[in-house]
Amino acid sequence: MLKARPQKHIENMIVAAEGLLHEDSNDPLKRANAVAGLLDSYFDFPAITRFSAGPYWRAATEAENANMSKRYGRLSSARW
């Protein structure tokens, strides 16, 4: 049943996203925080950032990498 796990993960994310749509209060800050929380719980932003940054990740300090990951997560959230 290992194949079912990714599908269940996506299904859970869709249900959570639909919940955000139904509970939307028309408060942009509240919506942004809710979307950021949703994305943080379903996506591994440090891994995505590490892959995307490539050699820049390896050359950066731990603090710089943490900052890159945080900013990438915020950027991704803002797009939604």
Image (cartoon, rainbow, N blue to C red):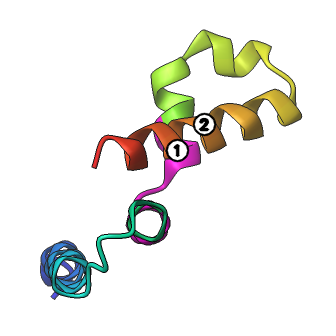
Classify 2 as above or below 75.
below
Q: Residue at x 20, y 72 (%)?
A: 6
What kind of secondary structure does the magenta stretch mostly adopt? helix
Q: What is the spatial separation of the Cα atoms under label 2 and label 1, in whole angstroms? A: 5 Å
Q: Which mark is residue 71?
A: 2
- Contact (Cβ within 8 Å) of mark 2 with mark 1: yes
Secondary structure found at label 1: helix
Tag 1: amino acid: Arg
Secondary structure found at label 2: helix
Other-residue count near label 1 (Cα within 10 Å), few / some / many at <14 / 14–19 / ≥20: some
Look at the image and say whether residue 46 sits in the magenta stretch: yes
Classify 21 as above or below 69.
below
Left or right, 65 with respect to 7, comes to right
Q: Residue at x 46, y 37 (%)?
A: 75
Magenta stretch, residue numbers: 33-48
Q: Which residue is mark 1?
A: 74
Asked where in the image residue 61 lies, by quadrant, the reply is top right
Other-residue count near label 2 (Cα within 10 Å), few / some / many at <14 / 14–19 / ≥20: some
Q: Residue at x 50, y 66 (%)?
A: 33
Q: Residue at x 62, y 11 (%)?
A: 55
